[in-house]
Image: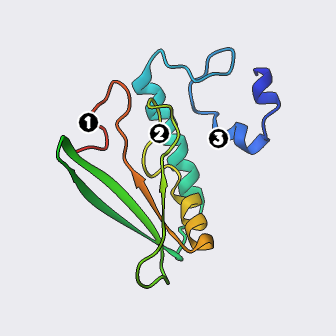
Amino acid sequence: MPISRLLMDRELSQALDGVPMTPNGAFDLTDIPATRAAFRAQAESIAESEPDDPSAITEEHRVSRADGPDVLVRLLRPATAQGPLPVMLWFHGGGQVLGFAAQDDPWLKRLGSRLGCAVAVAAAATAFQPSVGLR
């Protein structure tokens, strides 16, 4: 196990168990589709292990662009909110290589409920896959 994993919180380290890693502890990107699939499976497994937050509503919207395909935007808002809310725009991590719009939903639902705001997450294209999340 690389030193970086030894210093990591045990639960965080376990979340990376199914993701291909290089000997120095970095994501193994020699097979990007396989790494994406493993990362997505781990993120979905973590999300499924948490109970769905009934205090938040998830909506999906398509936003038209003049210069390209529509963009999928996920809007997470407190279920009890009425009327307009402030909106926090969230960009998921992944360095334009890994990640997907719903990966942070459990945390963002709690955050939006606590802050009293909606959270908008745009599906971003990843490197080498320009149409992911875009239609």
Residue 52 image position (x, y, % from top left): 53, 68
Instruction: Determine the CA span between mark 1 and mark 2.
Output: 14 Å
Residue 100 image position (x, y, % from top left): 43, 43
Within the image, what quadrant is residue 82 found in? Answer: bottom left
Instruction: Determine the CA span between mark 1 and mark 3.
Output: 27 Å
Left or right of 70 on screen, residue 12: right
Q: Are marks 1 and 3 in contact (CB under 8 Å)?
A: no
Within the image, what quadrant is residue 84 found in? Answer: bottom left
Which residue in the protein does label 1 denote? Answer: 131
Which residue in the protein does label 2 denote? Answer: 99
Q: Residues within 10 Å of mark 2 (few under 14, many from 20)?
A: many
Indicate the quadrant containing the C terminus: top left, top right, bottom left or bottom right.
Answer: top left
The numbered disc on residue 32 is none
Q: Residues within 10 Å of mark 3 (few under 14, many from 20)?
A: some
Q: How is the image coloured?
A: rainbow
Which residue in the protein does label 3 denote? Answer: 15
Instruction: Determine the CA span between mark 3 and mark 2.
Output: 14 Å
| Residue found 46% across the figure and 75% down from its top | 85
Q: Nearer the viewer, mark 1 or mark 3?
A: 1
